[in-house]
């Protein structure tokens, strides 16, 4: 993975990097899907589009992270990371990150 980068806005996100803190507002209804990961079993993934004043990005929330997320929910992601999946830039909380719902 690339060296740690510390953006705080969507426009500053760099694919393959981590960030300190990112605050976003959810702007779409959650899309749920079930995925199977080898050796881990089945997981629920909830994807939402979220934005700040500089742009919009897809946020993928795994299992319990997505509970209670709806349009208008404010998310604060700390120590998250950025990747591309199916041609879209995505923000994830990951194993070492935390998610707060500020609504």
Image (cartoon, grey):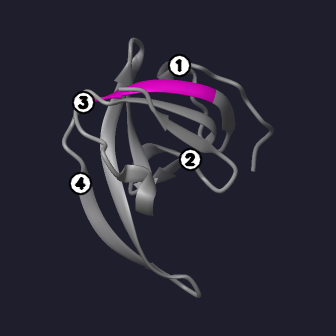
| Sequence-first tag of 2 and 3 | 3
| Sequence-first tag of 1 and 4 | 1
- Asked whether 65 or 18 is in front, the reply is 65
Mark 2 or 1, which is nearer the eye? Answer: 2
Name the disc covering residue 9, or none. 1
For label 4, count other residues whose C-alpha is less than 10 Å away and answer few (under 14), some (14-19) or many (20+).
Answer: few
| Sequence-first tag of 4 and 2 | 4
Going 46% across and 44% down the picture, which residue do you hit?
90
Q: Are marks 2 and 3 in contact (CB under 8 Å)?
A: no
Q: Is the magenta stretch mostly helix, strand or loop?
A: strand
Residue where numbered disc 2 is placed: 93
Q: Where is residue 75 in the image (x, y as percent from the top left)?
A: 43, 31
Residue 70 relative to residue 74: left or right? left
In three-dimensional space, the C-alpha distance between marks 1 and 4, rounded to whole angstroms, equals 23 Å
Going 60% across and 53% down the picture, which residue do you hit?
94
In three-dimensional space, the C-alpha distance between marks 3 and 4, rounded to whole angstroms, equals 12 Å
| Sequence-first tag of 1 and 3 | 1
Residue 38 relative to residue 72: left or right? right
As drawn, which residue projects farthest toward the left? 29
| Sequence-first tag of 2 and 1 | 1
Residue where numbered disc 4 is placed: 31
Going 55% across and 35% down the picture, which residue do you hit?
77
In three-dimensional space, the C-alpha distance between marks 2 and 1, rounded to whole angstroms, equals 15 Å
Which span of residues is magenta-colored?
A: 21-26
Up/down of 73 relative to 90, above or below: above
Is-magenta flag for residue 23? Answer: yes
Mark 1 or 4, which is nearer the eye? Answer: 4
Corner quadrant of residue 29: top left
Q: Are marks 4 and 2 in contact (CB under 8 Å)?
A: no
Residue where numbered disc 3 is placed: 27
Q: What element carries label 2?
A: loop
Q: Where is residue 33 in the image (x, y as percent from the top left)?
A: 28, 66
């Amino acid at each position: 993975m690339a060296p740690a980068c510390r953006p705080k806005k969507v426009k500053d996100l760099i694919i393959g990097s981590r960030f300190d803190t990112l605050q976003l507002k959810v702007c779409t209804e959650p899309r749920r899907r079930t995925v199977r990961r080898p050796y881990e079993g089945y997981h629920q993934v909830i994807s939402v589009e979220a934005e700040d004043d500089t742009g919009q990005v897809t946020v993928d929330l795994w299992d319990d992270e997505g509970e209670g997320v709806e349009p208008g929910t404010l998310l604060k992601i700390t120590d998250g990371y950025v990747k591309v999946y199916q041609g879209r830039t995505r923000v994830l909380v990951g194993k070492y990150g935390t998610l707060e719902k500020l609504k």
